[in-house]
Amino acid sequence: MTDFLIIGGGIAGISAAARLSELGSVTVLEAEAALAHHASGRSAALYEPRYGAPAVVELSLASEDHFRAAENVLSPRGLMIVAKPDQKDDFDAEVRDMQMTRCTLDEARAIIPILNPDTVAMAAYADHAWDIDTDLLLQGFAREAKSRGAQIVTGARVTAIAKGGDGWTVTTAAGEFTGALLINAAGAWVDEVAAMAGIRPLGFTPNRRSMARIPAPGGHDISRWPMLFGAGEAWYAKPDAGALIVSPAEEDPQVPHDAWADDMVLAEGLARYEEMVTEPVTRLMSNWAGLRTFSPDRVLVIGRDARDPAFFWLAGQGGYGFQTCPAASRLAADLIGGRPSLLSGSLTRALDPARFG
């Protein structure tokens, strides 16, 4: 019998394991053969703390101290938004919300020389965005958890969950595991896990996000280019290991599964990107997709279930799992341990699963 039984070995589950290992015994159950196989392993991995709904922004800002203290986890990237003339409203809102600085087209092209002067009407830049070394962050939390005796079990796909007088019994492909408190950090599968446990699902929606890797445009050295967004998040592009990742930034609802890119959606997104640059896309090096899972109000869900306090939700990270995980996992441990949180009471209430009735 473990004190804390966590379902899900993505960044949410592993960061929670590190925090909860301070309070008692921990077992993490991951369905796949390796950690972070699904959404966590397919993230664009940017720390831009002003990106998202107000509650998400507060969690992201509260995570900054951890990122600054973690050696080599962050590296400078920056962020640029470009827009066509008919995208002014979206552009203005994003510049305001993310506290960006407007720049001229010449200034923008000095940073990213392939911007198309015939289509780019507006641009803005911010330097408060950083690449996250996702593997380094994940493995740091895993080492911390293991150093306090946490057990991390891979290949443990859950097939049944039952509750008895002394806690939960979870049946998996790797055997049976028991725990007093069940933490649901199963990503796209959180509602399915809840249903297996006899807990009312909250209505999470997994949304597909496709990605393509293309060669560096025009042979440019793109290592210092910022992440580039089309206004309204119609597409984005980010340097990655000498190549460029381009996404159509779609949010197409899906059932939970091992996602793959949709060729037509990817082509449409690449066309939107190509419209704003001077270098055409001549070939794809690879493509993939992940599922970004949102609650009904698009804000994370962190807290004990309103009907069964032995079931704890750590879910709905959407596209913000990595940049919020330090504060989100600390809040989860504070709530479970009955400790006061440094986060505001209004934020804790905004994340509480009880908000869904």
Image (cartoon, grey):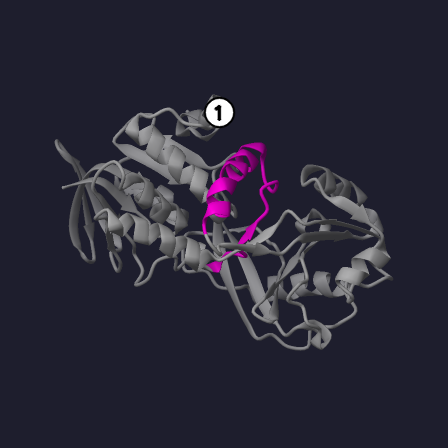
Secondary element type, mark 1: loop
- Residue 357 in percent (x, y) is at 41, 24
**Residue 56 in magenta stretch:** yes
> Does the magenta portion include 325?
no
Circle 1 residue: 344
Please give the name of the residue rendered at 58% of the width and 42% of the height, measured from the top-left corner. 49
Q: From the image, which quarter does the N terminus lie in?
A: top left
| Whether residue 204 is visible | no
Q: Residue at x 41, y 60 (%)?
A: 258
Disc 1 packing (10 Å; few <14; some 14–19; many ≥20): few
Percent position of residue 295, x then y? 47, 38
Task: Pinpoint residue 322: horizontal percent, then vertical percent.
Answer: 47, 48
Classify 130 as above or below 343: below
- Against 220, residue 21 (above or below) is above
Left or right of 6, for residue 68: right
Q: Residue at x 25, y 31 (%)?
A: 310
Task: Give residue 199's quadrant in the image.
Answer: top left
**Where are the magenta residues, as a range?**
42-70
- Label 1 is placed on what type of residue? Ser
Q: Nearer the viewer, residue 210 or 51?
A: 51
Residue 16 pos. (x, y %): 34, 42
Q: Is residue 290 visible?
A: yes
Q: Is residue 59 above or below residue 79?
A: above
Number of marks: 1
Q: Nearer the viewer, residue 40 or 342?
A: 342
